[in-house]
Image (cartoon, rainbow, N blue to C red):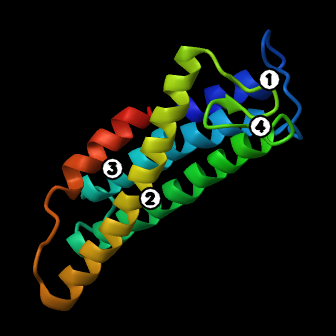
Amino acid sequence: SVPVLVALGMWGPLQGGSIPLSVYFGWHPVMMCLAFAGCMASGRWAYLTASLGDDSIDRRRRLHGIWMGCAVVTMLLGYVAIFLAHLPKKQFFGYNFISGTWIAPLKLVHVWLGYGLLLAVVFQGILGTVKLQILNATGERKFRFHGKLGKALMSLGI
């Protein structure tokens, strides 16, 4: 799968790879890829498919929530990795606070899209939790845009 290939590219004995596991930067792309292409894709599949031997919607919702919760945690670990990688040089939000310079424009777009996506995924996770609580308490289906927003966020992350 894609997360395995990204891990191989970071840590494997390849040109541009061979990053030691102790280097924080290498964990950033691996964890982000695992979150979006691994956990989120599995969460979407768990919700949509009835081929797990139990086709009940409650079971599928529970599996969906577990996978998506794992995705949020994994994504946040990916952010922590890049934060720790940039901490020694005091580079945050695409700005180097020591030299007083911005990173290259294309990298800056990556940084700011990443922050926006990170916040949106956390919001989506909270929204999904509240949506399920309301559904379980009242039977009412709220936040019907949750599925469309999830697909958009997953696509942007991949």
Residue 108 placed where, x, y %? Answer: 55, 24
Q: Residue at x 55, y 37 (%)?
A: 33
Task: Identify which amino acid the numbered label 3 is placed on.
Answer: Trp
Question: Would you place residue 49 above or below residue 94 in this image?
Answer: below
Q: Residues within 10 Å of mark 1 (few under 14, many from 20)?
A: some
Mark yes or no: residue 53 visible: yes
Q: Quadrant of residue 107?
A: top right
Residue type marked 2: Val
What is the CA distance from the residue labelled 3 to the residue labelled 4?
35 Å
Disc 4 to disc 1: CB gap under 8 Å: no
Label 3 or label 2, whichever comes before in sequence order: 3
Q: Which residue is mark 2?
A: 122
The residue located at (53%, 16%) in the rendering is 106
Badge nearest the viewer, 4 or 2: 4
Residue highlighted by disc 3: 45
Number of marks present in the image shown: 4
Find residue 12 and name its label.
Answer: 1
